[in-house]
Image (cartoon, helix red, strand yellow):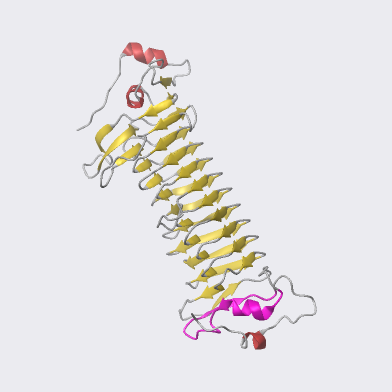
Amino acid sequence: MHVRSVVVLLGVLCVGATDGGAATWHVAKDGSGDFAVIQDAIDAAAPGDVIWIHAGRYEELTEGWDVWGNGTSFADCHVVITKDDLTLQGDGLGATIIGPTELPNTPDPNYTGISVTYNEAASLTIRDLAVENVRYGTYIACPACDMANCRFEGMAVDGVRLFTASHCTIDGCTFVNCYTGVHTFYPTANLTISACTFEMDEHLPVRGCACIDSQNVSVNDCSFVGGGGAIDFQQGTTGIISNVVASQFNTCGLVLSLGGFAQVYDSTFEGGLWAVISDGAGVMCERSALRGQSDSNIRINSEGISRFNDCEIINGGGYSVYCDYNGTSDCHVDITNCDWGTDSAAQIDAWIYDVNDGSEYCCAVDYIPFKGMTATEPVSWSAVKSLFRTPER
């Protein structure tokens, strides 16, 4: 059953109208605006209007909303978008808050902060507000979405869940203690996550603060702290990661799985078990730091193209590079011109596990030349390499 207030009185509509055709509807808890309930403003709005949500906590619900419009999925939603090209404008992420003060005490809470699907709208813009203590902060399944300067905190599942087909930008947003910060699914494409901060409980079991199944992805100028991991490129995801700092995660900074491929520039992954795991099409990494991983800084599980150049690879107690791909073709991992924290080729060699250590594997790591070598040192260490291999753990 839908519990919704539908306000379409002509006199009310005239209050929000503007000369340009679009309208700005003001929602205020104290009754000073056009409406006191967000859903009432959306129901009264026309495509292209702005819903300005003033300071306050908005907990009103649309109960049992048919999310996909086909009777297959129902949720209690705080805000249901039913008009095209709306803008939800808040007074600031610390002022305008959607959701309860704490996560509902139910075995499987199915509350959603903001919901929009293909059959309701083609696009949505969200700015300057916070969503707290629901299952999904946003459930976006329309062709295009832009959100900026928002906070998603205390989500039981995802801060932002996306199924966008055209494009989505997430700019300047903060994700705090969500099970996953951003979670995207096919057919999401042309996704940009920029200048965002992810602050997660380091004990969370998930691998990624951002779990991405998309094409043409850009993750730039973001900070990832805690959580199971930082970034997970899934299901053939391709994209560019630049100026990212990830730390205090408990598993992996970057995971590439099932055909995933990433170009990584000027980024830092510090701590955890692994900095990068490539189980997909590969990774090309330049001018980045991989420091202090306890299992291995880099783990290669596939034949894909993997290259790390002009990077800092600082051993954290296990291997620096571990290759366990056992395919039938030769596989070379280019990790040349990197700083390993030592000038000793023998020590670097001991930190690498590849085809020279396990005959069942076919990947070979090319690490010479490396930073710290002098011009008089040899450029071929094939003889030396055979003397300084550590046994497989």
Identify the residue at image location x=49%, y=81%. 361
Q: Is residue 5 left or right of residue 33?
A: left
- Report the front residue among 31 and 300: 31
Residue furthest to the top in view is 11
Residue 390, placed above or below residue 343: below
Q: Is residue 282 left or right of residue 48?
A: right
| Magenta highlight on residue 349 | yes
Q: Which residues are magenta?
A: 343-369
Q: Is residue 262 left or right of residue 114?
A: right
Residue 134 lies in quadrant: top left
Residue 132 in the image, given as x and y percentages of width and height: 39, 38
- Report the front residue among 197 and 325: 197
Q: Quadrant of the N terminus?
A: top left
Residue furthest to the left in view is 1
Residue 209, placed above or below residue 70: below
Residue 109 in the image, given as x and y percentages of width and height: 28, 43
Residue 289 lies in quadrant: bottom right
| Magenta highlight on residue 148 | no
Q: Can residue 162 be seen at all in this image of the molecule?
A: no
